[in-house]
């Protein structure tokens, strides 16, 4: 089961099993958790400097780290019976007293027993009545159950176009262990529970039974909370399922938090011909498999490549690009890699061309790819001065197409303040960072980065006092911008002129 956490990016050593199958305790950095819960962004997992054993107390844990529960639900390729309709609730009714609640449970159980007996002993009369049930996909029902119970956003890390939204009709019950968010990957859905509680009801009964023995009201209070939770689940047309004392966590004031059994609410009607445990392909490891429409059959990502490259030589890559077999993005990425540049390294990050000033959706104002971005911004005179006036400095051309400072400015929305203050400005001034992608393209003398063609997350800020990077008014959001920006890069206009920029950046026109 720990292997599935590779999709979440959490190393095995930061996980611990619990008594409940599919439930783990994870040790995570608070910034990583904040990025998920607050900004719906799965950031790269932050590891501890020296991690030899799990912290025993809060002092060893530190102020930057926290423990959370993570429930893992593997996706399955089967059809299941759809969930019942949600009961219509009358909000004006006062809460039930204990005796009224017991009567409600008694009546409900009585009705259910009669229904089961009727189905069991009247099968002959029902055989001629074939009820058609429209089955639904297992994964859709799983998402619906998580939404009904926790009302939390489900972040789909495979499809950046999906915007997670919290469930409005459902609020998590006070006795259900809350979930900060849920993360959907290719093969599973992870539910992240916050806060973390150390002890459950089984620990109390086993090691400290005197807590409940001393006062009869404490046991009644726990039972009352269980019944209230059960009623809340029934109102959502769900059940707590097969839970045990280990699934009921306890605070010092006898308040309980329950982790329901989600699987108890899913009823498989018929299993697909393929094995139910079939593993959905991981495109990041095994590569994408594209259909005739050039969309991945697994994750739905669109490609502009007609063939997939692996270890081709520079000559082979150039020939594939000239023939239109690989996209501009793939070819530029290969050139960056062959030139020694590394993704994520501020000193030599991959560089891509700015192809438009974003004045319009159709790329109305194209960038002149025969000139470097520095020459476009500073002008011919400024660039010539650095070479023609050797009195004050050594004559030179500006060869740095992407400085480390510019890289940090580009990635400011996803970079901690401490790193920005160390590499950009010693004093944190949010207004000094460009507010929009248009302003950034206009301001910088450096080239673009691949993230502006692939990752909508770089537009969303992790800082409270730094707003998200604005996109042009002609697009609906960062995801729409990424799609149109990539289309501009792969357009006929850019493809016919891109060789000039390649010669300036990687080829014979590159001047040291």
Image (cartoon, rainbow, N blue to C red):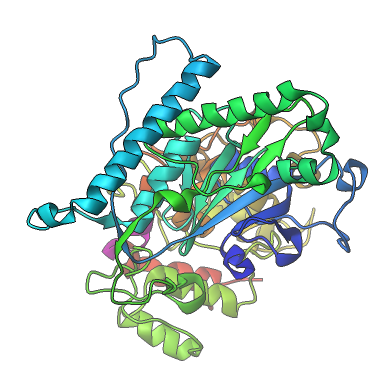
**Is any atom of residue 13 visible in this view?**
yes
Q: Position of residue 268 (x, y in %)?
A: 33, 60
Is residue 501 rendered to the left or right of residue 396?
Answer: left
Foreground of the two, 288 or 122 = 122
Q: Where is residue 479 in the image (x, y as percent from the top left)?
A: 40, 47
Foreground of the two, 269 or 491 = 269
Q: Does the magenta stretch include residue 486?
A: yes
Is residue 487 rendered to the left or right of residue 106?
Answer: left
Q: In which quarter of the image is the N terminus?
A: bottom right
Which quadrant of the figure has residue 249?
top right
Q: Residue at x 49, y 24 (%)?
A: 102
Q: Which residue is drawn at 52% across and 75% down?
A: 285
Name the residue furthest left: 128
Which quadrant of the figure has residue 210?
top right
Report the magenta stretch's main SS: helix
Is residue 307 rendered to the left or right of residue 427?
Answer: left
Is 50 rendered above or below residue 197? below
Q: Is residue 37 magenta?
A: no
Q: Residue at x 68, y 48 (%)?
A: 246
Is 425 rendered above or below residue 423? above
Q: Which residue is drawn at 40% across and 64% down?
A: 76
Q: In which quarter of the image is the C terminus?
A: bottom right
**Is any atom of residue 164 visible in this view?**
no
Foreground of the two, 479 or 426 = 479
Foreground of the two, 159 or 451 = 159
Q: Position of residue 159 (x, y in %)?
A: 41, 55
Name the residue furthest front: 121
Is 461 rendered above or below residue 218? below
- Magenta-tinted stretch: 485-493
């Amino acid at each position: 089961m720990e292997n599935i956490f590779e999709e979440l990016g959490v190393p095995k050593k930061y996980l611990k099993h619990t008594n409940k199958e599919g439930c783990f305790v994870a040790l995570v950095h608070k910034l990583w958790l904040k990025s998920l819960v607050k900004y719906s962004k799965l950031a790269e997992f932050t590891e501890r400097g020296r991690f030899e054993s799990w912290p025993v107390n809060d002092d060893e844990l530190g102020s930057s780290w926290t423990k959370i529960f993570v429930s893992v639900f593997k996706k399955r390729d089967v059809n299941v019976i759809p969930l019942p309709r949600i009961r219509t609730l009358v909000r004006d009714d006062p809460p039930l007293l204990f005796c009224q609640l017991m009567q409600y449970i008694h009546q409900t159980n009585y009705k259910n027993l009669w229904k089961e007996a009727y189905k069991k002993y009247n099968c002959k009369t029902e055989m001629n009545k074939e009820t058609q049930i429209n089955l639904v996909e297992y994964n859709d029902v799983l998402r619906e159950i998580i939404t009904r119970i926790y009302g939390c956003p489900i972040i789909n890390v495979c499809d950046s176009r999906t915007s997670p939204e919290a469930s409005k009709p459902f609020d998590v019950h006070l006795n259900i262990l809350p979930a900060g968010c849920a993360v959907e990957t290719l093969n599973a859905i992870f539910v992240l529970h916050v806060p973390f509680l150390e002890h459950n009801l089984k620990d109390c009964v086993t090691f400290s039974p005197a807590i409940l023995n001393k006062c009869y009201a404490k046991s009644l209070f726990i039972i009352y909370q269980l019944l209230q939770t059960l009623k809340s689940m029934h109102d959502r047309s769900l059940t707590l399922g097969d839970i045990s004392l280990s699934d009921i966590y306890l605070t010092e004031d006898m308040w309980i938090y329950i982790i329901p059994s989600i699987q108890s609410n899913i009823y498989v009607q018929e299993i697909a011909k393929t094995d139910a445990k079939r593993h959905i392909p991981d495109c990041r490891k095994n590569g994408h498999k594209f259909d005739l429409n050039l969309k991945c059959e697994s994750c739905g990502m669109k490609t502009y490549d007609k063939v997939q490259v692996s270890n081709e030589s520079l000559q082979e890559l150039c020939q594939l690009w000239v023939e239109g077999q690989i996209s501009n993005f793939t070819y530029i990425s290969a050139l960056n890699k062959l030139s020694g540049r590394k993704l994520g390294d501020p000193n030599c990050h991959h560089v891509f061309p700015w192809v438009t000033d974003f004045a319009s959706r159709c790329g109305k104002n194209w960038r002149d790819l025969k000139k470097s971005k520095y020459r476009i911004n500073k002008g011919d005179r400024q660039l010539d001065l650095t070479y023609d006036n050797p009195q004050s400095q050594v004559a030179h051309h500006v060869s740095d197409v992407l400085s480390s400072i510019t890289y940090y400015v580009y990635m400011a929305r996803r970079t901690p303040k401490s790193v920005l203050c160390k590499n950009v400005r010693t004093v944190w001034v949010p207004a000094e960072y460009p507010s929009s992608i248009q302003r950034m393209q206009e301001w910088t003398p450096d080239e673009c980065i691949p993230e502006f063609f692939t990752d909508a997350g770089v537009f969303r800020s992790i800082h409270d006092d730094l707003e998200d990077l604005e996109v042009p008014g002609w697009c609906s959001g960062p995801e729409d911008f990424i799609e149109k920006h990539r289309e501009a890069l792969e357009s006929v206009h850019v493809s016919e002129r891109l060789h000039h920029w390649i010669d300036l950046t990687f080829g014979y026109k590159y001047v040291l």
